[in-house]
Each structure stands twice: as C-alpha cells, then as structure tokens.
C-alpha cells in the first residue's frame, strides 16, 4: 500500500464554521483551495498563511491593499478553517505606516475597522460582503503577488 503524499490529500475548506460569523462565499473558498492545491502542502502542516501583495502599492500612489489570510487545520472536522482575514493600508499623514485597516478574526469572533474600533464579528457582515466581492475581483484579475507559508 502506498503512503499518501501531500498532493493526494484533499484540501477541504470548512465554510460552515466561518459562515456562522460572516457570509463567506463558496467562490472565495474555491479560489483559496485552488491556490493551496497548487502550493504543494507539506504533509504535517496544520496552518497556512497566504499573503496577497500589490508590488506597486505605496502611501503616495495608493494601489490595492495587502491582504493576509490564515487558515488552520481542524483535526475534529478534518477541514481547514478560517482563522483571520486582515486587510492592511497605509495610515498617517506625515509618516504613514502600514497598519491593519480591516480585520475579520474568526478565532476570536471579533472584527476591527480603522477609526471604528473592535466589535463583534457579526457587526461586520455588510462590510465583509463588500470587502470580499472586491477582493475576489482583484484576485481573479491577477493583481496580486501571492506568497504561501505553511506551518
């Protein structure tokens, strides 16, 4: 009997646990799954962080915000679950720094938006729908450099 390799093990993203908090679409899960399948997952990985960067994004000229998505493997469900989705942006007038602009934290069921603060994740449902629709279109249009780090 052959030992399964990382590419033979299916990657399943658990939408149900995430949807309890926010309206994550099947389209986003499928896009992420495609990225992860192509990334050649190491066999013992229990978490993955995906970074999306627009190389031309700057405080001066703008561009597409950097995004970081973390998924963690649940041995209970044998599926990958959303841990957080964070959108970064330059903030500050004279000395802008790259900081969290929007954060959807599934692990803590809390959300954050710059100038609004922290609130229960359920309060960010409308913002999430808008954010995800934009992010998916940027991803489909191939506007990001993508880095995948397995833990």
Image: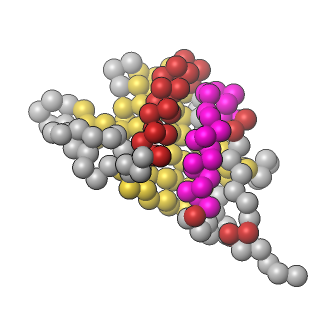
Which quadrant is the N terminus positioned in? bottom right
Magenta span main SS? helix
77 relative position to 149: left or right: right
User: Can you name the residue that lies furthest to the bottom here?
Assistant: 1
Please state the horizontal and vertical placement of residue 41, each as a whole percent of the image.
61, 66
Please state the horizontal and vertical placement of residue 26, each as a whole percent of the image.
65, 39
User: Can you name the residue that lies furthest to the right here?
Assistant: 1
Q: Quadrant of residue 17?
A: top right
Please state the horizontal and vertical placement of residue 58, each as a whole percent of the image.
21, 44
User: Can you name the residue that lies furthest to the front here?
Assistant: 141
Q: Count the marks.
A: 0
Out of 137 and 94, give the one closest to the viewer.
137
89 relative position to 3: left or right: left
Residue at position x 53%, y 26% from top?
A: 129
Can I make out residue 134 in this image? yes
Out of 30 and 97, give the one closest to the viewer.
30
* 35 is higher (above) or lower (below) than 31: below
Please state the horizontal and vertical placement of residue 11, each as a whole percent of the image.
69, 56
Identify the magenta region. Answer: 17-37
Residue at position x 59%, y 20% from top?
A: 122
Q: Is residue 67 magenta?
A: no
């Amino acid at each position: 009997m052959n030992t399964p390799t990382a590419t033979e093990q299916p990657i399943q993203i658990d939408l149900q646990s995430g949807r309890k908090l926010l309206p994550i679409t099947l389209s986003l899960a499928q896009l992420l799954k495609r990225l992860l399948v192509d990334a050649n997952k190491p066999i013992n990985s229990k978490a993955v962080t995906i970074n999306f960067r627009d190389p031309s994004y700057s405080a001066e000229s703008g561009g597409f915000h950097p995004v970081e998505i973390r998924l963690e493997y649940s041995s209970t469900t044998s599926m990958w679950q959303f841990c957080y989705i964070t959108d970064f942006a330059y903030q500050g007038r004279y000395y802008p720094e790259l900081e969290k602009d929007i954060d959807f934290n599934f692990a803590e069921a809390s959300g954050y938006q710059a100038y609004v603060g922290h609130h229960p994740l359920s309060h960010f449902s409308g913002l999430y729908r808008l954010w995800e629709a934009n992010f998916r279109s940027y991803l489909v249009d191939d506007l990001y450099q993508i880095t995948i780090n397995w833990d």
